[in-house]
Amino acid sequence: MATLSKVIGDSALDHQHIIPLDFDSVHELPDSHAWSDHVNDLYSKKYTHLKHVPMNEESCVPIIDLSAPNVVELVGNACETWGMFHVINHGVSSILIDDVVSHARQLFTLPTQQKLKAQRAPGGGTGYGVARISPFFSKLMWHEGFTIMGSTVEHAKELWPHDYEDFCNVMDNYQKTMKSLAHQIMLLILKFLDINKEEEMISKPSIYESEGALQLNSYPCCPDPNRAIGLAPHTDSLLLTILHQSEEKGLQIQQNGVGWVPVPPVSGALVVNIGDLLHILSNGRFPTVYHRAVPSQDRHRISVAYFYGPPVESIIGPLNKLPSPIYRSLTVKEYISLKNKHHEKALSLIKI
Ligand SMILES: O=C(O)CCC(=O)C(=O)O
Ligand SMILES: [Fe+2]
């Protein structure tokens, strides 16, 4: 049976040959990573109204207390208006989060040759490498990543042959914790859409048997951050993403009529954003968030994203209750393949 790792790894575009830069060894932005013209091109053609906004502007993405009595409305309204929100009182221990970040930092500060021992294999979904969307852009990103789905023992052994257990235990624990939080948030969202668990279980049992992937992102200090991009604009493919960004700014979302708006970290909060599958499930009512990350000159930023989605063999489409579906139903596997091949055009390809 297909797994998320296999389906994600089955990219039509080959990115195995793109190896992350040895960031420590460069003191000027190499041409391969100099985006300025490309970025300006991209936005002046497509989004003429967009401007870069200063990084120190406050973001207005809502902050939601998960213990609030009206949490269903708060979450639902944020999904409709922003497709993104912060959650506080989420029950995830700050010790666990700090542990994940410090292990991720330890990984990314290994020498490049050592990190490459755990490189994502051709057709594989997990391990060290460039962003999966890299082949869609002519310039490279100021970024390196490490993907985990389930056990990470094999890759961790390649990195630390005698001392890998701690890393694996922390990542296992974090994946379990994120899965349960994502499930809890998903139930609030379904409640807002007036779908109760029993009804939904009859038509789409898949939501309750979800799979996930953990993505450790590293954005090293960049000699020329205004001309580089950390992670190019994209939407996340699955249902929900739960992102932890440590103290450094870098995440931005695109807002109609405004441009790129920073989403600075909120102490103790996790960022939740809607992905393509939940956009489809809600029949377009919830926007899937177009976002990107920018690097900084003097801070090595780490972020940790957990992507939550249904099993890849399950069928996803606008919920039965919602009238006039605007998307056709398809398997999760099929949608991920479309996304692997067509990037941001995937959604338009399944419009009815
Ligand atoms: O690093 C960030 O803030 C964003 C990460 C992200 O968008 C992703 O991993 O998909
Ligand atoms: Fe993302």
Image: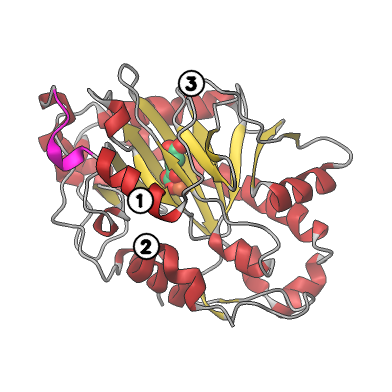
The foreground one among 57 and 51 is: 51
Which callout, 3 or 1, points to the residue nearer the camera?
A: 1
The foreground one among 127 and 52 is: 52
Residue 308 picture location, percent across and down: 54, 55
Residue 28 is marked as none
Residue matched to label 2: 5
Helix, strand or loop under label 2: helix
How many other residues sit within 10 Å of disc 3, few (<14), some (14-19) or many (≥20)?
some
Residue 81 showing in the rendered view: yes
Residue 191 picture location, percent across and down: 81, 58
Instruction: Name above or below for residue 113 compared with residue 343.
Output: above
- Which residue is at a point 32% across and 38% down the rendered structure image? 229
How many other residues sit within 10 Å of disc 2, few (<14), some (14-19) or many (≥20)?
many
Which label's residue is closer to the chain start, 3 or 1? 1
Q: Quadrant of residue 158?
A: top left
Residue 172 showing in the rendered view: no
Residue matched to label 1: 42
- Which residue is at a point 55% across and 26% down the rendered structure image? 265
| Amino acid bearing label 1 | Leu
Tell me whether circle 3 and circle 1 mark residues in contact (CB < 8 Å). no
Which label's residue is closer to the chain start, 1 or 2? 2
The range drawn in magenta is 28-34
Residue 169 picture location, percent across and down: 42, 38
Residue matched to label 3: 247
Establish whether ligand 1 lies closer than 8 Å to the Cβ of label 2. Answer: no
| Amino acid bearing label 3 | Glu
Coloration of the structure image: secondary structure
Q: Is residue 105 left or right of residue 246?
A: left
Give me the C-alpha separation between circle 1 and circle 2: 31 Å
Residue 290 picture location, percent across and down: 51, 50
Helix, strand or loop under label 3: loop
